[in-house]
Amino acid sequence: MAPTKNAPEELKSLPTGHPKAGYTAPVLDGQQGVGTLPDNEQEWHDDNVQARQDAADEVAQYEDEIARQENEDRLAADEETAAAQEKATKSAAASKSTSTSSTGS
């Protein structure tokens, strides 16, 4: 299924243990849903849930930025390596061609 124009682009993440990987605190509350707490406690709980979600969103954006930059760097390095290998191959082929033509005369 092709992505639609309105679909948000999927964020990339970093693997566990990556030196630049972000951290989000685990959910440590035992509350499930709305209506299980008095209003004043529910407001506090909702604020905590929102703060945790905001932090998780920031970490996801940061990791996406880092992962995309590392991917671009990796692609650039691969292109440089391929260009160097191609140049070395052409150089070796040219010198082999020159040496066989001079020994064949």
Image (cartoon, grey):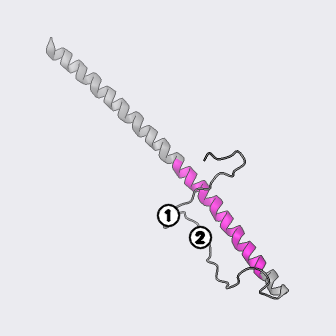
Q: Residue at left 48%, top 47%?
A: 74
Q: Residues within 10 Å of mark 1 (few under 14, many from 20)?
A: few
Give the vertical position of 72 relative to 82 (above or below): below
Q: Quadrant of residue 102?
A: top left
Q: Which mark is residue 9?
A: none
Give the vertical position of 70 relative to 28 (above or below): above
Instruction: Residue 70 in the image: state x and y as whole percent.
Output: 52, 51
Q: Residue at left 69%, top 73%?
A: 52
Magenta-colored stretch includes residue 66: yes
Instruction: Residue 43 in the image: state x and y as whole percent.
Output: 82, 81
Q: Amino acid at mark 1?
A: His
- Of callouts 1 and 2, which one flags the residue occurring earlier in the amino acid sequence? 1
User: Which range is magenta?
Assistant: 45-71
Q: Residue furthest top?
A: 105
Instruction: Give the Cα separation between the discs numbered 1 and 2.
Output: 11 Å
Q: Residue furthest left?
A: 104
Give the vertical position of 76 relative to 56 (above or below): above
Q: Residue at left 44%, top 38%?
A: 80
Instruction: Residue 82 in the image: state x and y as whole percent.
Output: 40, 37
Q: Label 2 belongs to which residue?
A: 23
Q: Residue furthest front?
A: 1
Give the vertical position of 70 relative to 55 (above or below): above
Q: Residue furthest bottom?
A: 38
Q: Amino acid at mark 2?
A: Tyr
Q: Is residue 85 left or right of residue 102?
A: right
Secondary structure of the residue carrying numbered label 2: loop
Q: Quadrant of residue 34?
A: bottom right
Instruction: Residue 16 in the image: state x and y as whole percent.
Output: 50, 66
Secondary structure of the residue carrying numbered label 1: loop
Q: Is residue 23 left or right of residue 88?
A: right
Q: Which mark is residue 18?
A: 1
Q: Quadrant of residue 85?
A: top left
